[in-house]
Amino acid sequence: MKHLQLIALLVVAYFAVWLEATFNWPRRWLATQVDVLPALVVYAALFAEMPTITAVAVLGGLWFDALSANPLGVSVLPLFAVGFVVNHFRELIMREQAYAQYLLGLGAGAAVPLGTLLVLLSTGASPLIGWGSLWQWLVMTLACGALTPAFVKFFNWLDHTFGYRELAAPSFREDREIVRNRR
């Protein structure tokens, strides 16, 4: 399942970034661009290993930056940081619960834009920040919160449909020795 999960995450990340760059009606309707990569990174951090999280954060961040006004590589560090923190504490998180997924998505949706802004400001860039930025941040936070449980359901369905389940071990083992007492 690990290879299927990695391929599926990267395909969804690429397709999501392409959709964000291609279709303008959500951006016009909401007055902001919704980024789904934080929700994907949260899913990867909850249910995958560190190489998968790194691949989604690095490739997804580079794809996003290549199709946006961001300098190349600015989104990678915040995405990876969120994935690293969630992965580090995933044994303490009730990751099968939808409300926990929603709250993690809210946190990632809030942290990634702030981290990206911090990286942009540390590079000497002067991004446009105003009262509209607060609206954009709020919409992106709520959208990532709503998308995280949806991604969990989608990838669980994908795993159930295309993955295989291991069979339970039989009770009889060929290497066991049967001791018989003679009376």
Image: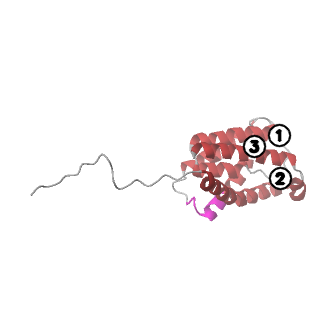
Tell me, yes or no, if residue 121 can be seen here. no
Q: Which residue is mark 3?
A: 14
What is the crowding at mark 2: few (fewer than 14 residues within 10 Å), some, or many (at least 20)? few
Foreground tag (1 vs 3): 3
Which labelled disc corresponds to residue 67? 1
Q: Which residue is mark 2?
A: 133
Report the magenta residues as a range. Answer: 94-104
In terms of image quadrants, where is residue 61?
A: top right
In this picture, residue 63 sits left or right of residue 101: right
What is the crowding at mark 1: few (fewer than 14 residues within 10 Å), some, or many (at least 20)? some
The secondary structure type at the circle numbered 1 is loop
Q: Where's residue 25, x and y in %?
A: 89, 54
Q: Amino acid at mark 3?
A: Tyr
Report the front residue among 168 and 44.
Answer: 168
Report the front residue among 158 and 151.
Answer: 158
Q: Where is the C terminus found, in terms of image quarters?
A: bottom left
Asked if the residues shown at circle 1 and circle 3 are in contact, with their CB atoms under 8 angstroms apart, the answer is no
Q: Amino acid at mark 2?
A: Ser
Of pointers 2 and 1, the one earlier in the residue sequence: 1
Coloration mode: secondary structure
In this picture, residue 129 sits left or right of residue 107: right
Q: Where's residue 126, x and y in %?
A: 83, 40
* Overall secondary structure of the magenta section: helix
